[in-house]
Amino acid sequence: MSRRLWDHTGVTSVGIVGAGRAATLHAEAVRAARGVHLAGVAARSTASPGAAALAGALDCPVMTARELAGACDVAVIATPPAARAEALAELAPSRRLRAVLVESPAATTVDGIAELSAAFGGRPVMAAVNLLHAPAVRRMLDAVTAMDPHHLELRLAVPDPDRGPDAGRAFGGGVTMDPAAGFWPVLVAAMGAAVRSVAAPRLDVVGGLDRAAGVVLRAVDGRTAQASLRWGAPVAEAAVEAADSAHVARVEVWPAPIVEIDGASTGSPADPAHTVASRRGGSAHRLAALGFTAQIERLVRVGSGEAQPWPDLAVASSALTIAAAASLSAKYNGIAVDVSDVPRDLSPFEILASTGC
């Protein structure tokens, strides 16, 4: 069947479902990746101005989801979280489509993430966590494995995303979901163990959405990590830092990926995280430095059967559980909440709404 694309042409066709900022980044990553072809962009309506603009910029067609499913070997779903199950359901009947990548957060509820895997009939589903593929982040995490950190911290500040009046239902929550859903897996990887409990001693809620938060994670082995998150920053800034009695490892993700071990930048000058072009904002270099390009190339290998989906939906579920637990903690004045107590059928936004926070 579709295996002929790898056997005879060596080119894999990739489709993008969505037309927002995340879809644009994934589409540009497809253009930058090796051995792939951008088949097209799908939106709810082929008349979507956003889809037309994206397709025009990338010189590819606008299709319906079903048309796209018949034209590509792997796909990226980058719609708002609440619409991702519907998008996957439209793609699932395709006999050609072999794997999908779902943008983070993968759904608005934990149950919703479980339904994604079932909807695709057991075929591989990757969770989009580009930072786990980023060279600078990988080096930082490698350094942390040799440490016994007593200090782990995520600091994240972004401009107001201005999602509109229905943002809570469409995206499932505020800053603990967007963009933190893409950072929780990095912090958990640095902890080196699964999260047992989450406390949110600070959660600033406006219009039902958490706009700023202070969150504490505790792992099953007792190690803790802190996160300071906020919307409303003039520019996006993000960094993860780990320290023990002898070493400090820090990766600055935004505005440009740079890793420092004991105060010294590390890595090959040829690495995308250290090129002059990447620091100046060169598009292809920046996509590689942030892990977007490697993530697409991993998806292609998954589709061809050469690799396992990584990260998988369990990682996405863990990230969403952290956000939901933070909302639940707010109900109890910031005390720690065991992750097993998190409602699987409620989004962080719905948890906040149900508590009057």
Image (cartoon, rainbow, N blue to C red):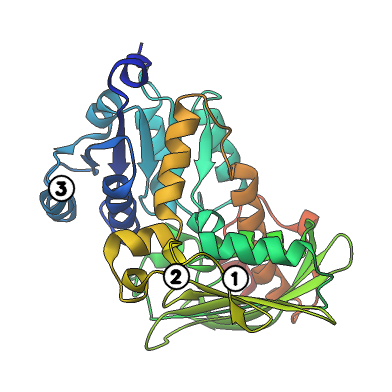
Mark number for residue 352? 1
Q: Left of 47 or right of it: where is 198?
A: right
302 or 48, which lies in front? 302
Quadrant, the N terminus: top left
Towards the viewer: 258 or 174: 258
Q: With respect to residue 339, does 65 lie above or below?
A: above
Quarter holding residue 255: bottom left
* Towards the viewer: 140 or 51: 140
The image shows residue 165 at horizontal and vertical percentages of 34, 70
Which one is in front in this view, the residue at disc 2 or the one at disc 1? Answer: 2
Say left or right for 265 vs 225: left
**Picture layout, residue 124 above or below residue 5:** below
- Report if residue 277 is visible in the image: yes
Is 322 above or below relative to 261? Answer: above
Distance, label 1 to label 3, CA atoms, is 38 Å
Using a 10 Å C-alpha cutoff, classify the residue at mark 3 as few (fewer than 14 neighbours), some (14 to 19) or many (20 or more): many
Q: Quadrant of residue 160?
A: bottom left
